[in-house]
Amino acid sequence: MQTGWLENNGARLHYQTAGTYGQAVVFVHGLTCSLIDWQSQLERFKDSNQVAAIDLRGHGQSDSGNAAGSETININSFADDIIALIQHLKLNNVILVGHSMGCRVIMQACHQQPNLIAGLVLIDGSRIGEGSADELEANIRTHIKKIGYVTFHQSTFEPMFNVDSDPAMRDAVMARCALVPEDVGLTAYIGSVRWDALHLKTVLPSIKVPILVLQSTYINDQRQRTSLKTAETSDWMEYVQAEASNVRVETIPDVGHFTMLEQPLAVNAFIETFISEFKLN
């Protein structure tokens, strides 16, 4: 695995690459996470594909740029960084794989530069913002002011694991995510909510490349994250199918939100099949 650094829009961004031929695949992590989440996928595909993963600005080993405000920590800026990485590595016809918040990032990147993207894999995405973006943000800030950011972060992440999740994996993810500063974590979370409210309805229908949705959880009516059962689908899966033109959905049941960590073999198999379909075409 090769480590590299990229300067873009005031931020120094950390990434890893491997492989020199085959279909290019770029992996994008979620909120307060890092490229460490993709090690099973990088190892699996490095001998047959060009693979890369990035620490989004303010996450992992990447810095936040000139400031960690909403001007630099948002879905559009993250997408700009993905496009910059693709161009920096001179990749073409890239399959983008995103997890959670990373689903928003790769959809936005495809919307901005569709000529660079061959397909999208959305792993356990969701829609968490509908209605007025300003009202949603105000409600979030009021809630966090009452309970504190640390409690908010813990209460958001703890339900991402179910009773069968490996405790060591859960604790490692929780500890790693807690290291991301509040100004980055909160701003990125609010940015995700605002993007859903303001841009998802426009961006998703604009995507014409094939989309693979791999889903393991959904957020129920009580705003609780719940594991899907075999053959069960979610509102998010149905929404993507309704709004985009070339979508396949697959359920990975009985695991938590970090699907690629809890079921790496299943995730890798679905991605491998997705890649093979491009080879056939």
Image (cartoon, grey):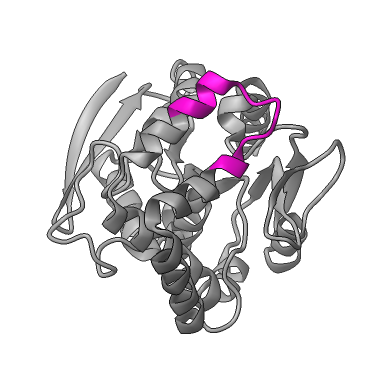
Q: Is residue 34 visible?
A: no
Dividing the picture into quadrants, the one containing residue 240 is: bottom right
From the viewer's perspective, is residue 204 above or below residue 211?
below
x 29%, y 68%: residue: 70
x 42%, y 58%: residue: 109
- Chief secondary structure of the magenta portion: helix
x 16%, y 55%: residue: 65
Q: Nearer the viewer, residue 49 or 105?
A: 105
* Left or right: 5, with 99 as reference point: left
- State how many labels appear: 0
> What x and y, as percent, mark residue 278?
61, 38
> What x and y, as percent, mark residue 159?
62, 43
x 39%, y 39%: residue: 177
Does the segment drawn in magenta span residue 162? yes
* Left or right: 60, with 221 as reference point: left
Dividing the picture into quadrants, the one containing residue 219 is: bottom right
> What x and y, as percent, mark residue 130?
60, 75
Instruction: Tell which residue pokes out farthest to the right in this image.
Output: 231
Magenta-tinted stretch: 158-172
Does the segment drawn in magenta span residue 168? yes
Q: Nearer the viewer, residue 16 or 83?
A: 16
Q: Nearer the viewer, residue 206 or 106?
A: 106
* Left or right: 76, with 4 as reference point: right
> What x and y, as percent, mark residue 21?
41, 24
From the viewer's perspective, is residue 270 above or below residue 182?
above
